[in-house]
Image (spheres, rainbow, N blue to C red):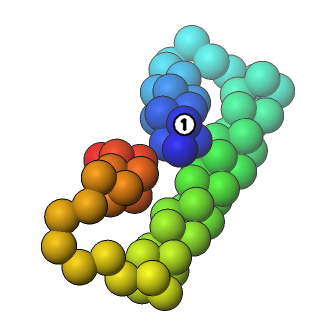
Amino acid sequence: MAGFISTLAASKLVAWHRWTGPPHEVLCVVTFALLALTFVGYVILCVSEIARVRLGYNIRRWATVFPLG
């Protein structure tokens, strides 16, 4: 889920006052696309956790928790 980190970095660049013109517009579109893909990934993680519940402690739980953090 590196998408969240990429989205955060892109949003920081969008907020930077020196980015103007066409590169800024392209970066805005890319940022929203990354955000949408990140949300889709989170939905997939949540649905898969609901579909296959793991009761109690399981080391595989980190595969779900870590990207959400």
When the figure is inspected, residue 62 is found, relative to residue 28, above or below; the finding is: below
Q: Residue at x 50, y 27 (%)?
A: 9
Q: Is residue 9 left or right of residue 57?
A: right
Q: Is residue 11 left or right of residue 60?
A: right
Q: Residue at x 73, y 40 (%)?
A: 30
Task: Give x and y (percent) for residue 8.
Answer: 47, 35
Q: Residue at x 65, y 46 (%)?
A: 34
Q: Is residue 42 left or right of residue 65?
A: right
Q: Residue at x 23, y 79 (%)?
A: 55
Q: Is residue 26 left or right of residue 60?
A: right
The local secondary structure at tag 1 comes to helix
Task: Give x and y (percent) for residue 2.
Answer: 54, 36
Task: Give x and y (percent) for residue 69.
Answer: 30, 47
- Which residue is more in the foreground, 7 or 64? 64
Task: Give x and y (percent) for residue 14.
Answer: 56, 30
Residue 65 in sight from this viewpoint: no
Q: Residue furthest top?
A: 18
Q: Residue furthest bottom?
A: 51
Q: Please tell me how crowded label 1 is: few (under 14), some (14-19), or many (20+) other residues with Cα within 10 Å.
A: few
Residue 26 in sight from this viewpoint: yes
Q: Amino acid at mark 1?
A: Ala
Q: Residue furthest left?
A: 56
How many tags in the picture? 1
Q: Give residue 60's quadrant in the image.
A: bottom left
- Which residue is more in the foreground, 27 or 59? 59
Task: Find disc 1 in the rendering and name its residue.
Answer: 2
- Which residue is more in the foreground, 29 or 9? 9
- Which residue is more in the foreground, 56 or 10? 56
When the figure is inspected, residue 10 is found, relative to residue 52, above or below; the finding is: above
